[in-house]
Image: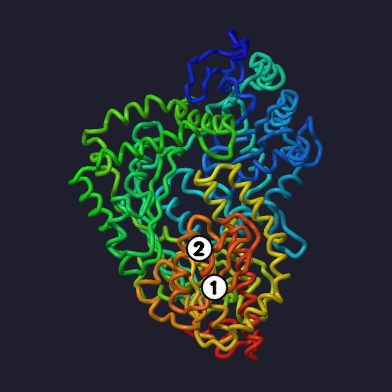
Amino acid sequence: MSKQVQSYPGYTLVRREESPLFHGVATTLTHDVSGATVLLVENEDENKAFGIGFGTFPCDDTGVFHILEHSVLAGSEKYPVTSPFMQLVKSSMASFLNAMTFPDKTVYPFATPNEADFRNLMDVYLNAVFCPLAVQERSVFEQEGWHREADGRFSGVVYNEMQGALAAPEARLDAAMDAALFPDNGYGFVSGGDPASIPGLTYEQYVKIYRRHYRPDNCCITLYGKMDMGDKLAFLDRAYLSRMPKGAPRPRTPLQYPQAGIKKEAVYETETPESIPVQCALGWYTGRFEEMEKQTAVNILLDALLSTNQSPLKKYLLEQDLGADIDVAFDGSVQQPVLELVLKGTDRERAARFAPAVRAGVEQIVAAGIPAELLTASINHYEFQVTERPGSLPDGVLAAIEAVTGWLHTGDPMADLRPEPVFAFLRGKLGTRWYDALLAELFGPEPVEVTLASEFRYCNPIVSERTLALVISQSGETSDTLAALKLAKSRGVPVLAIVNVVGSSIARAADYVLYTYAGPEIAVASTKAYMVQMCVLYLFALRLAYARGKLSEAETRRYTAELQRAPEVVRPRLDDCEYIKYLASLFVNTQSCFFIGRGFDYALSLEGSLKLKEISYVHSDAYAAGELKHGTISLVTDGVPVIALATQRAVYEKTLSNAKETKSRGGKVLLFTTKDAVVPEGIADYVVRLDEYEDLFMPLQLIVPLQLFAYYMAVLRGCDVDKPRNLAKSVTVE
């Protein structure tokens, strides 16, 4: 190991300890003048890392810390070039270079194996956060935050990003859960910024908030890896920290008094209501961040009881026929962690049984006792994840992020970086009733219900002044959605509309509006508007996952970069027109067909089937591939077309198996899959190959050939593609 620092001029030693997690020594210091917390992790890792993080609890929905994250990287006093960060991305040898805004902190980490590169990057980052031009030049705020265009519309990097990010109804409802659970502190706000609130942020407020939060006494700095720590500490002290004496106590957010039984309802509109089932989410507080053993045990319980369809609690809930699937979410990195269970593919009657079913399932498991071997396996699995850290982020970057988290909530940057005693404690509880008691303690109903807009008027909705009604319409004139909007307003519920058409009825009637700006679409069947809505949903999902700590900044930026590749991935699909037209000619005389898929492919099968029936008048139904044997397969006979979508790697083999079942019954299988996928003989009659792309975003590529297939089927059948019979662009009657 490189020579370790023995003295720390300008700093006070808080603690020095062995770190088995990082195979080295961890030293926590406090800078004497500024009050900054510094963590040194000295080991033999050549991929050196640096990180500086600030406590940034939001106090409203203006997204000020998101805007600041963008702004400080737009030039500094020492590096006044335009966007030095982007220039570093192009020229640096860094293995990781990013900035991250979380619900409660903002972190600026990097990693590089090169010593000279490290020193340069460290100076750029420190100058960016402590000496940004953003607090001297209003234009940076207007560019990165918001401004008015000549036509009166709002714009700005963060404003535009969040317009897209908050357009997904599912994500808005997830945010409603946060607002319900945390009405009295910073976790209840949209940390990335709500476009309805972003223009309420003034430049003066922005500068004041920067000066209040971007201070050494409100930061945690991490130096990680094999390097001369004494040299780096001296540079920190000389160039920055000693010039900024400590000030007022650092900003905090209060603990939330637990809310019990809070319920929210939201509405949204779709042109295919039969394909959008109800979802129901239940949320529970799990205690405090500093209860390390308890929060780690929550992760272990979730893995043991809910990770697969055969896990005891999930199996029990699925057997109750409540819905199509159950997802679980948990983030232990926040001040008061929250556990969520989400029931998907249900209806109002079954959703009402979700919370009682969870209670009954938990009671049954507690009475019988959780099998020790199940807990042991989950402990082993989770311990491997924590200690071996499989994934794309460098160890030093993870250390920097987790150091800020521990410092933020406990004052100790190593609080979340000592897993060994935690797992020793949890292993010691095996063979006792400790886990059963914890399970019984955790679960209590706090449901959030989701209802279709077309049903909203007739279900006697439970709403209050704390409810937000979210309505979505492409045209802004959809009758049932407008009726639901008016009902919500009559109950005193604020309404946020997400529409495409500026000045439409829904836009005028709503309290707040987010426009998608997809542009005019004359054809009744939506194509480009559908694509834009899908991109908006992706952006929102990514931003929400990032804001809730489900994705790191690096993962979020990687996914965003991959999403930005969509045009180059989608464009080649237009070159497939002749082949798609040929396939359409083979099926042009069919009277009925089926679409099947799993996961995202199932969602796309619904849209592909809808497009086909809308414009070609061919009877078409879409099914989750795994549901075929529950009755649908009896309709597959000789010559019946089955369009199988198999682009998701995790379920590829299962989808092929389902396609084979239809083929064995005489179906004509048209398979959509990727270029590198192996398709065994006898599975499909025809195959459409797509380019390799992130599974998450594959629907953006897959939808194009499905729309083209519907288009050519309609053209070859002599149908009016733009104006199908009996359909209108806006549904003006219920």
Viewer-proximal residue among 387 and 531: 387
Q: Residue at x 57, y 89 (%)?
A: 589
State which quadrant residue 712 falls in: bottom right
Figure quadrant of the N terminus: top right
Image location (x, y in percent) of residue 232:
67, 18
Q: Residue at x 72, y 65 (%)?
A: 571
Residue 640 shows up from this direction: yes
Image location (x, y in percent) of residue 119:
72, 24
Considering every residue shown, the one lying at the far top of the view is 7
Q: State left or right for residue 176 relative to residue 95.
A: left
- Name the residue type under label 2: Pro
* Residue identifier under label 2: 169
Q: State left or right for residue 63 relative to residue 364.
A: right
Viewer-proximal residue among 499 and 373: 373
Q: How is the image coloured?
A: rainbow
Front position among marks 2 and 1? 1
Image location (x, y in percent) of residue 356:
25, 58
SS assignment at label 1: helix
Q: Residue at x 56, y 22 (%)?
A: 39
Residue 157 in the image: above or below residue 320: above
Considering every residue shown, the one lying at the far left of the view is 367
Residue 509 shows up from this direction: no
Q: How far apart are the alpha carbons under marks 2 and 1?
A: 17 Å
* Residue identifier under label 1: 607
Question: Which of the two labelled residues, at mark 2 and mark 1, occupies the earlier sequence position?
Answer: 2
- Name the residue type under label 1: Glu
